[in-house]
Amino acid sequence: MSYKRTLGRLGLALVGGALAVGALLVVIRARADDTAAQLLGALRREQAESTTNDVEATDTADISDLPAPVRRYLERVLPGEYPDVQSVRLRQTGEFRLGDADSPWKSMTATQHYTVAPPGFVWDAQIDLAPFLPVRVVDAFVGGAGSLEAKLLSVITVADAPRSPELDEGELARHLAEMVWFPTAFLPGHGVSWEPRDDRSARATLAHRDSTATVVFHFDENDEIVRVTADRWRDTGDGEFERCSWTGYFSDYRELDGVRVPTAAEVAWNLPSGDLPYWRATIDDVEYDPLPTGTRRSNTSPGPNPE
């Protein structure tokens, strides 16, 4: 979610100007913003074009060679038999902060679609700047390219991030960190390489097209991922980026559709001036679309999830 700085440019002047022409905007607000639909269509076409061989390569996953905390985590969150997920739809309710640490939180709802092979997502969110003044934000990683577009009342473009390698890498890092919501993507054969660090953490790397992202996953005594850390590109304005420490927090694990996933999360930039949380939400619903080959079984046959 490296677009926070871009959205932060929306100030009081924009709000005031929009309110001044409120009567007109109420009329045009009903116009549909098709950006998300177009990106989602492109993501699904790319998924359909992925080769059959790539799918079959994931049909038998042996997790015995994975770092110990990763292996324990997968045994914890996956049942003995589980669908090999190819796409996901997730709904979120929460808050988003536009600006610095003194800025107020704004209510937010979002629907996010993911694909595993190839890695990609479309995040379609509404952030309420003020009563009756929503911003539609579509953040995506499709075809190896990151994109961000924000529209006031779904029609007036207020942010449109230019294409850049930094944006692409940042969006791929986001996808990797958020695979906690579809953990079968961590299994061997899905493109993630693991490097052991210690008994409670491991480093994951995922490459797609011209981008490579690395995220460190931290596990608690329950063998669940509770924190992710990374050095990510942060938009400083005017198309400039700088590498900053970034942290995501996950909690309140529950079993959804047979898979144990966190249902609460928060992310923050770790700046020299202090941490800057900018997104926090609960997960209201997760829907999985399994591979056509059906149900698969791990070679280690993890047992039922303890509650």
Image (cartoon, rainbow, N blue to C red):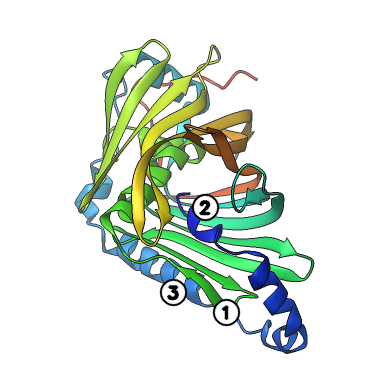
Q: Kindly identify the amino acid type of the residue bearing the numbered disc 1.
A: Ile
Depth check: 73 or 296 in front?
73
| Placement of 94 over or under 29, stated as above or below | above
Residue 281: where, in percent of width, then height? 65, 43
Depth check: 42 or 233 in front?
233
Please say whether residue 172 is visible from this viewpoint: no
| Placement of 227 over or under 31, stated as above or below | above
Q: Is residue 148 left or right of residue 146?
A: right
Residue position marked by numbered label 3 in the rendering:
38
Residue visible at 44% across and 67% down? 40
Q: Nearer the viewer, mark 3 or mark 2?
A: 2
Occupied quadrant, residue 168: bottom left
Residue 156 is labelled as 1
Between discs 1 and 3, the one toward the N terminus = 3
Q: Kindly identify the amino acid type of the residue bearing the numbered disc 2.
A: Lys
Between the residue at mark 1 and the residue at mark 2, the CA separation in whole angstroms equals: 18 Å
Residue 139: where, in percent of width, then height? 47, 60
What SS does tag 3 mark?
A: helix
Residue 4 is labelled as 2
Between the residue at mark 3 and the residue at mark 2, the CA separation in whole angstroms equals: 23 Å
